[in-house]
Amino acid sequence: MKSLYDFIVEPLGETYNNEIEVEDKKLILNNKVETWKFVNRQAIVKACPLAYYTGISVGDIVVLHQNVFRVFYDTKGKQKKSRSWFKDNLYFCQPDQIYLYKNNDIWFTFNDRCFIKPLKNNSSLTNDKEQKLIGVLKYGNSSLEDKEINPGDIVGYTPYGEWEFIVDGERLYCMKSNDIVIKYENKGNQEEYNPSWASSSR
C-alpha cells in the first residue's frame, strides 16, 4: 500500500471526539457532524509519500487538518465520508495538512508550523481567562530558531491565524512562523493557561 504524493493515515481513536470523561463519567459534547471543532485531528501514519522524503515515518502520530476525517452532507442531504477517505479506516492526507508529528515520543513541527501555549490572564479588569495574542512557544521550528526564538520564549502573534488543538492534554494554538511578530522578555511571573476540560481530551 503506497501513495505517490500523499500520506495514508488512520484515525487515532474515532473520527470525532464527541465525549470526554469527567470524574469517571462520560460527558457528551457534540452530536453533529457539521461541528468541525470536534473532528479528531490525530492519526497514525500507515504509508508515506514515495515522491519525496518528509522526515515522517510509518507508525508516527500526526496532528492534522480537521477536514481529513470530517463527515459531510451532499446536496441531497445524504451523509458522506470525508473526501480524503481511501478505504476501510484509511484516509489520504496531503503534506500541507500535517502540522505536528511524534517520533520516538518526541513532538516535531512540520513545515512552517509552530504551537503556542496561551498564558493565564490575572487581570481583575476582564473576565477573559487567557491573555490575548500572547503565549509561550511550545513547539518551534528552524525558521524561528534562526531568529533566536526558541521553545519557552514568550511571544506575541497576529490575530486570526491561530487554530486550537489539544495535544497530550494541553490546549495549544497552531500557527505559521510568520504569525509570530515579537519576542517578549520573560520576567518569570507568567502562568500558562490550560482549561480543565483540555486535560480530559486527546
Image: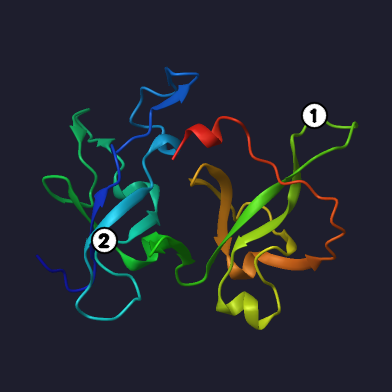
Q: Mark 2 vs mark 1: which is more N-terminal?
A: 2
- Badge 1 crowding class, 10 Å Cα cut-off, few under 14, some 14 to 19, many 20 or more, is few
SS for dot 2: loop
Across and down, in percent, residue 47 comes to: 19, 65
- Closer to the camera, 33 or 200? 200
User: Looking at the picture, does residue 77 appear above or below residue 123?
Assistant: above
Q: Is residue 122 above or below residue 27?
A: below
| Between 47 and 82, the one nearer to me in the picture | 47
Tell me the amino acid under the disc marked 1: Asn
Quadrant in which the C terminus is drawn: top left
Disc 2 residue type (three-letter): Gly
Q: Is residue 54 left or right of residue 196?
A: left
Q: Nearer the viewer, residue 168 or 172?
A: 168
Q: Quadrant of residue 77?
A: top left
Q: Position of residue 40 (x, y in %)?
A: 36, 41
Front of the two marks 2 and 1: 2
**Residue 127 has which mark?**
1
Residue 45 higher or lower than 42, as above or below: below
Question: In which quadrant is the N terminus drawn?
Answer: bottom left
Q: Is residue 167 left or right of residue 192?
A: left
Residue 59's label in the rendered image is 2
Q: At numbered mark 1, what does the secondary structure look like: helix, strand or loop?
A: loop
Residue 31 x/y as whole percent: 36, 22
Residue in the image at 56% along x and 73% along y: 141
Mark 2 packing: few (<14 Cα in 10 Å), some, or many (20+)? some
Q: Position of residue 139 (x, y in %)?
A: 57, 63
Q: Is residue 182 left or right of residue 142?
A: right
